[in-house]
Image (cartoon, grey):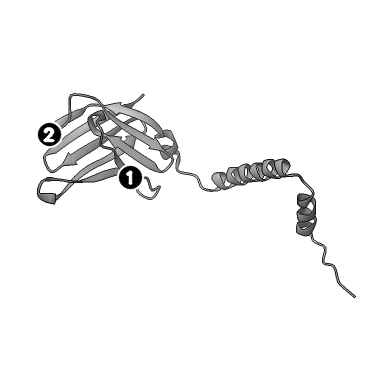
Amino acid sequence: MKRFFFSPFSSFLSSFALLNKGKKIRFLFSLTLLGSYFLGSCFSFPAFAQEAQGIWIGTLKTEKGTCPTERPSTLVIRNDETLFIPGSGSLILKGTFSPDHPHYHAQFIAQGTNHKPFPMVFEGHFDQEKELFKGIYATPSCRANITLDRK
């Protein structure tokens, strides 16, 4: 005598097998969306990190050396990703945001002359009261302050 084990999951699988291919894809897609919605609500960033999301524009003010001050620089904050483009040029400094550390950090290490590393670093913080970013951009040949406003 065979024993059949009934569970809600086996019932779900048998009804899923009866669906045609197009309906299966739509069903799995909607399950994926629903799951990502609930998981996304479980892992959230602090309020200041959510307010900082967006595109920020500002001009570098050179403290020392030669910096790209002719054109505005861009800071992009998306979820936990930080991108800084000095002088809106072709180099993109990348970084990640951690809720444990309230500063935004991005860097890019290029190969300089004589194959020596040429680090470029952006370090900034979000001023909630004034709703702007303040930061420092530095390379071996440049150090500059920057204030960025939301675009």
Q: Is residue 103 visible?
A: no
The residue indicated by pointer 2 is 63
Q: Which mark is residue 14?
A: none
The quarter holding residue 22 reads top right
Where residue 122 sits, quadrant-wise, is top left
Q: Residues within 10 Å of mark 1 (few under 14, many from 20)?
A: many
Residue 35 position within the rendered picture, expressed as x and y whole percent measured from the top left: 62, 47
Q: Is residue 130 toward the left or the right of residue 18 in the image?
A: left
Q: Position of residue 123 (x, y in %)?
A: 26, 41
Q: Quadrant of the N terminus?
A: bottom right
* Residue 16 in the image, given as x and y percentages of width and height: 76, 50
Please identify the residue farthest to the front as the structure is shown. Answer: 21
User: SS at mark 2?
Assistant: strand
* Residue 149 seen in render: yes
Mark pair 1, 2: CA separation: 23 Å
The residue type indicated by label 1 comes to Gly
Q: Earlier in the sequence, mark 1 or mark 2?
A: 2
Q: Residue at x 77, y 53 (%)?
A: 12
Nearer to the camera, 51 or 80: 80
User: Left or right: where does residue 5 sit relative to residue 40?
Assistant: right
Q: Which residue is mark 1?
A: 95
Residue 87, position as x, y percentages in the image: 23, 29
Q: Residues within 10 Å of mark 2 (few under 14, many from 20)?
A: few
Horizontal side, residue 94 vs residue 9: left or right: left
